[in-house]
Image: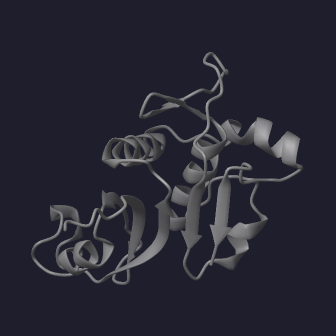
Amino acid sequence: MISIKPWICYMITSLDSNKTYIGSTNDQYKRLKNHNSSKGAKYTKGQIWIPIVLISGFKNKYECLSFEAGWKKLAKKRSNKRFDIINNFANNKLEYLSDTKWNRIMDLVYFVNHFTMIGTHFKMNNLWKYPINSPDKLFIEIIWQDWVNELPWPYFCEISF
């Protein structure tokens, strides 16, 4: 009998530099082993990588890959104005800093607060042009970063450490 492994989206960080990498897999242990050997993505070669964020709860591969693409896309144009609504609503002072890991997690906070699902695709919904359609539950595991519990996660995100 074939067992189907659930898909996860993950962020790993390098112990050798301040680099991060976001990807998707249905076998996180094999994928991490590949990143730490010559079989990983070109970007991760020659460095030691550890997981820092694991996100699960996707119904299928396509949902996971769509989530990964949406999260990555936010790094292209960063602006602290992006957080105005979240900061006002949650009475926070979220902002981008010079730390790559922090900025990727801020992208994640923004993304999970501003997307809608259209079929199996996660789509940015900045101005709420589309009906809000959230997944049943996303499980976000942050490894070694307990301060993220204080961030304004939406109701469908279950955070663990």
Q: Nearer the viewer, residue 94 or 29?
A: 29
**Residue at screen point 63% across, 15% down:** 129
Position of residue 119 in the picture relative to residue 151 (left or right): left
Position of residue 59 in the picture relative to residue 154 (left or right): left
**Residue at screen point 77% across, 37% down:** 84
Picture coordinates of residue 145, whole percent (x, y): 62, 77
How is this picture coloured? one colour
Picture coordinates of residue 72, whole percent (x, y): 41, 47
Picture coordinates of residue 147, whole percent (x, y): 72, 74
Q: Is residue 79 above or below residue 36?
A: above
Q: Nearer the viewer, residue 62 or 45?
A: 62
**Residue at screen point 33% across, 41% down:** 62
Q: Is residue 7 above or below residue 141?
A: above
The image quarter containing residue 24 is bottom left
Q: Outermost residue toward the left? A: 38
- The total number of labels drawn is 0
Q: Nearer the viewer, residue 80 or 66?
A: 66
Q: Which quadrant would the N terminus be assigned to in this image?
A: bottom left
Q: Is residue 4 above or below residue 34?
A: above
